[in-house]
Structure formats: C-alpha cells, structure tokens
Amino acid sequence: MAASSSQTIAFTGGGTGGHIYPGIAVAEALRARGFRGRIAWIGSKKEADRRTVEAAGIEYLAVPAGKLRRQASLENAADAFRVLAGYAASRRALAGIKPALLFSKGGYVSVPPCRAAASLGIPYFTHESDLTPGLATRLNARRADRVILSYESTRALLPAAARERAIVAGNPVRAAIRQGDAAKGRAILGAPEGLPVIFFLGGSQGARQVNELAAAALPRLTEAAFVAHQTGAETAQGGARAAPDSPRYRSFAYIREEMPDILAAADLVVGRAGAGTLWESSALAKPMLLVPLCGSGTRGDQVDNAELFARSGAAISLVGPEATVDRLADEALSLLADPARLGAMGEAARALAGRDAATEIADLIIKTIGDAS
C-alpha cells in the first residue's frame, strides 16, 4: 500500500453506538488492508464512548462536546460554550497528532473536530448512516473532501454544493458481526434446539417502547419461540426484566462480545430502525420487525429508514399507533410460521444493505492519503 507506517488517521464521532461502531469497523478494515500507522479517536468525555473505542484497541482523545439542537432550549447557551471549547480542544489535538486525514462518523461530537480539521488544512471525510442526512452531516459536508453515504437517494437531500463530492459506500459493519456462529449464540442463550429465536434490540442506551412491547408480548411469543432481549445498558426501562424466570426468555442489559453469535442465532430481529440495527442485521440476512422512533423528539430518520426497508421487502414497519402489543405479536408469529417468507425477507435485507462498506471506505482512505503523500 502507498500509505506510510508513520502516518496517522484520526476518527471522530460518538454519543451513541451508531456513531462509534461503524467508525471502529473502518479502523479494523484499515488494519486488515495493511495500514500500520497510528489511529486515534477524538470523542466526547462520555466514559461509555471511551470504553467502547479503547476496547477496540484505538487511542482515545476526549474533548468537550455540546449538543446541536433544532428547537429552542435553555441548554443551548451552555452547549454553545461546550461547542467552542470542543473546537479549541480538537484543534489542539489535531495539531498534536498531525493526521493525514480525519474520518467523521457524525453526531454532534463530530462537528468541532471537522471544523478544526478544515482550519488546519487537514482533509476529512464525513459519513451518513441514515437515509436522511442529519444536522451534523449537513454542517460537516460543507467543507468535507468526501461525503460518504449509505444510500444513493440521500444524495439529493444534501446541500447542492456537496452532491458532487458524495459517494455511496453503505454503512460500515464490524467484521466480527459477519463471523457470528448461530450454534454458539443458541448455546449462550440456552435456546432449546428447534425453537426459533426472536431477538429484541433495545439499543445501546435502551428503548422504552421496545422494552415495554417485549414485556407485554412475551406470554404469546414464548408459546412459539425463544425470546432474547437486549434492554439497554444506560436506561434499561420498561421490560428490562420482563420474565426472569421464564425458560424461554433471556435478557441482557448490554451485549458486547456475544453480539455476533446471538445475532446469528436470531430468526427474527425486533427493534428500532437505527442504521446499526439495520445494517448489522442485513449483513447476516436477518428479517426485521421494526418499531422506528418517531414523534416530536426526533427528525424522523428512523421512520424513513424503516419505510425504505419495508418497501424493499426486508422488514415490516410498525410506526406510531401501529406499534401495539397485539399487532407486534401477530406479525412476529405469522412470520415464524412462514419460513419461506422469512428467508425472502432476509435475502432482501442482504441485497439492500449487505455490501462491505468498511472495506470500501478503508480502501478510499488509503488511496487518498497515499496519493497525497
């Protein structure tokens, strides 16, 4: 490869697993493609973010981070100071490590480092996981050398000046996810042989609605399936401990190393419609029953994601009032009773979002820093 072992590549992003794990996937792919230089991550001061990044063997540099809100809030003034402090700290960090390129996975944490990189003449790429670009992507795209998208239809939603710099590569998925072992997953869960597995994903921070649906639907679902449930480590609420004594149910606050195997064991995935859930499930051709986050507290990105996967035949989407306990149980049991339909949905998911984005992006980074050296 053209990249020198003395070069540094910086990453930024955070706040949720969806803004960290794809970046880790790209860092892993860089190593797998032969990059031997320094990799450093500029992230928030959240300990959960630091632990996740450092567990992947990546150096972590913490900077202040302020949220970017569309609505008026008394917290905006305080966050404005945090954003300015984050910019100054990011500039110092980048000037110190002198990266050949910064890769941004998005989220409010990423905006000050991207602005700092631009001020220092450091090229940067910004990546958007969702169908509709978020505020951070719109801000970062203005001066990004490349805007990397998961879907072609996102291009038209970017600022006009950024469209020609946009490329479609998909959403990066860690290599370990693709290597999951279904038999190991069933053993971890204690799922009886021959019993299908429904996997509820409450997300890394917990999803009250998903947890409550899991708890309420459990009596019906366990008549025909084994239910595994990640409730969320930080805000495990609702159905966090729905049925601890049930032989056909097992809950986890958060799943780390076992995730690839448990996901591989799932016959049906039930959860939100964040990019991480969609692309990790699709990498293993898993059919999905989606309950996208909607309402005034969200920009509607999950609803858009879910509708795309539903139109493609990869998922069933239950939005807002459609997401009742009976509807969820009816849909799940109907799918489990129709293996051919389950299989077709899984293949549709793989066709829509099964590409190896991490390797594609790593190759682009290597080519860019090699050409620039």
Image: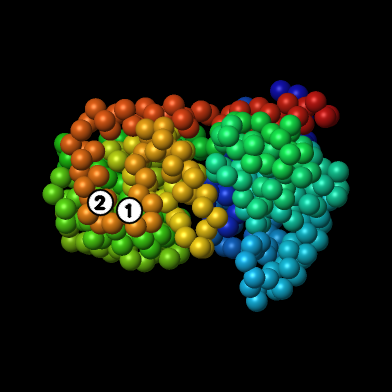
Mark 1 Cα-neighbour bin, 10 Å: few <14, some 14–19, many ≥20:
few
**Residue found at the far right of this picture:** 120
Confirm or deny contact between disc 1 and disc 2 (CB under 8 A): yes
Residue 237 shown left or right of residue 330 in the figure: right
Q: Nearer the viewer, residue 143 or 255?
A: 143
- Tell me the distance, in whole angstroms, between the alpha carbons under discs 1 and 2: 7 Å
Label 1 sits on residue: 322
Q: Position of residue 18 (x, y in %)?
A: 53, 49
Q: Nearer the viewer, residue 371 or 220?
A: 220
Circle nearer the N terminus (1, 2)? 1
Q: Position of residue 17 (x, y in %)?
A: 52, 51
The quadrant where residue 68 appears: bottom right
Who's the residue at 33% across and 44% down the image?
289
Who's the residue at 39% across and 38% down the image?
310
Residue 159 shown left or right of residue 131 in the figure: right
Residue 2 shown left or right of residue 223 in the figure: right
Who's the residue at 51% across and 52% down the image?
300
Who's the residue at 75% across and 49% down the image?
114
Q: Is residue 240 above or below residue 14?
A: below
Instruction: Say what secondary structure mark 2 lies in.
Output: helix
Q: Position of residue 250 (x, y in %)?
A: 26, 54
Q: Which quadrant holds the N terminus?
A: top right
Residue 213 visible in the shown view: yes
Specify the amino acid type for callout 2: Arg
Label 2 sits on residue: 327
Q: Which quadrant holds the C terminus?
A: top right
